[in-house]
Amino acid sequence: MDIAATWKEWMSVFNGWNEWVLNIIQIAGVLLLAWLIYLASKKWLSRLVRRIAGQTATRWDDLLFDQRFFNRLGILIAPAAIRVIVLHSGWNDISWLTKLLDMWIAVAIVLFVTTILGGINRIYESYTISRSKPIKVFVQVIEIFLYCALAIILFSILLDKDPQNLLVGLGAFAAVLMLVFKDSILGLVAGVQLSAHNMVRIGDWIEMPSSRADGDVLEINLTTVKVQNWDKTITTIPTYKLVSESFTNWRGMQESEGRRIKRSVNIDIFSVHYLTEAELERLKQSQLLRDYIERKIAEIREYNANRGNLLDERRLTNIGTFREYMESWLSSNPDINQEMTHMVRQLQPGPTGIPLEIYCFSARQAWVQYERVQADIFDHLFAIMPLFNLRVFQYTGIAAAQEDR
């Protein structure tokens, strides 16, 4: 047995083991250093920047430098530090390590950029203009583009291919990509149209029966529009539906100074008659009707002066005087916007009587106050109508059943 040869063989193995152990120690040291850098950027750097940002008068730095920003920054700094160390330590021959680091850095860069975009969106949403011109749709489009570019870069690093060659081959998958990102593409086009034509803003009250949505818009993003209904449920509508289908936006009412009241009551035709002298004297005591009755009586007397037949004469009716009373009552009501249209009119008579419609605009736009104003009008209408000897129409079968009770 050649002892020298055996010794050399064992020494070569030992040296190989020494080199392998040394590499492990070096890699562990690099990972430890990267971990310390990550902790420093995540905790100590974040504390320093937050302290500086807290002393500034502006709020944009507070909205931009959130905890996620520093987490993503640490994820980016750590592999970058390892890559620099690997580059200067002669380890470039370890291809799997360099590939892994390059892929890590690419992912970290995209995550860091998307975090900055999210911060910019939060800063923009802190201004009033964001309610009418949201940019979240465009931010999401940029993020999708970045993620697509990231996928191409990762495949190019993994396969050792030029990204340009991958882009050339990507044309064959264009149809598949359009199918996969159909909602995103439609949402992008719809978002641009909604923003350009000012169709929907955050905070608008919209009503879309096809999607069972009736409430305030909470969020407009690339693919969906979130609406909080009045029962506090959330309805999610695809963004492109707001362009392809009809919906009602109540913003015009909210921005105006009135909310429309349009409701009618049916009057029994058989209760309509000419006013007697006694009824005229009683109604004339009302301040709202005194001038009207005196003026109309003077006009009627002048008109009837040369007419001796009752069929040719003009006379005041209880329904016409009641319309004038309600018109004057609305004109003196502080809850009605007097700058907008208000009237009391008759609609087409039918089997259920004569519809008498109240058409006006409430000066109180809030839902509860609006309903209260509307109810007060018709409470007064129903209560005052018997003084004009008018009756509300209702089916006699129901009335008879109520009398039997």
Image (tube, rainbow, N blue to C red):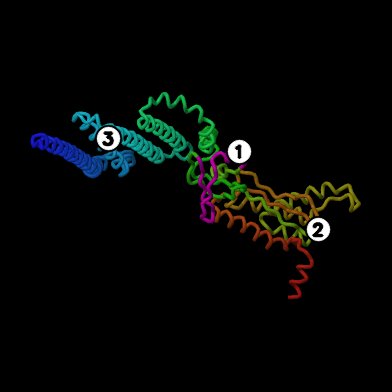
Numbered disc 1: secondary structure: helix
Q: Residues within 10 Å of mark 2 (few under 14, many from 20)?
A: some
- At label 2, which amino acid type do we have? Ile
- At label 1, which amino acid type do we have? Ser
Horizontal and vertical percent position of residue 226: 50, 46
Q: Which residues are magenta?
A: 223-246
Q: Residues within 10 Å of mark 3 (few under 14, many from 20)?
A: some
Question: Residue at (42%, 24%) from the top-left corner?
Answer: 165
- At label 3, which amino acid type do we have? Leu
Q: Is residue 314 magenta?
A: no
Q: Is residue 244 magenta?
A: yes
Q: Is residue 67 left or right of residue 6?
A: right
Query: What whole-number distance in Å separates the C-alpha atoms at marks 1 and 2?
Result: 47 Å
Determine whether label 2 and label 3 are within 8 Å by CB.
no
Numbered disc 3: secondary structure: helix
Horizontal and vertical percent position of residue 356: 73, 53
Looking at the image, is mark 2 or mark 3 earlier in the sequence? 3
Looking at the image, is mark 1 or mark 2 earlier in the sequence? 1
Query: What whole-number distance in Å separates the C-alpha atoms at marks 2 and 3?
Result: 94 Å
> The N terminus lies in which quarter of the figure?
top left
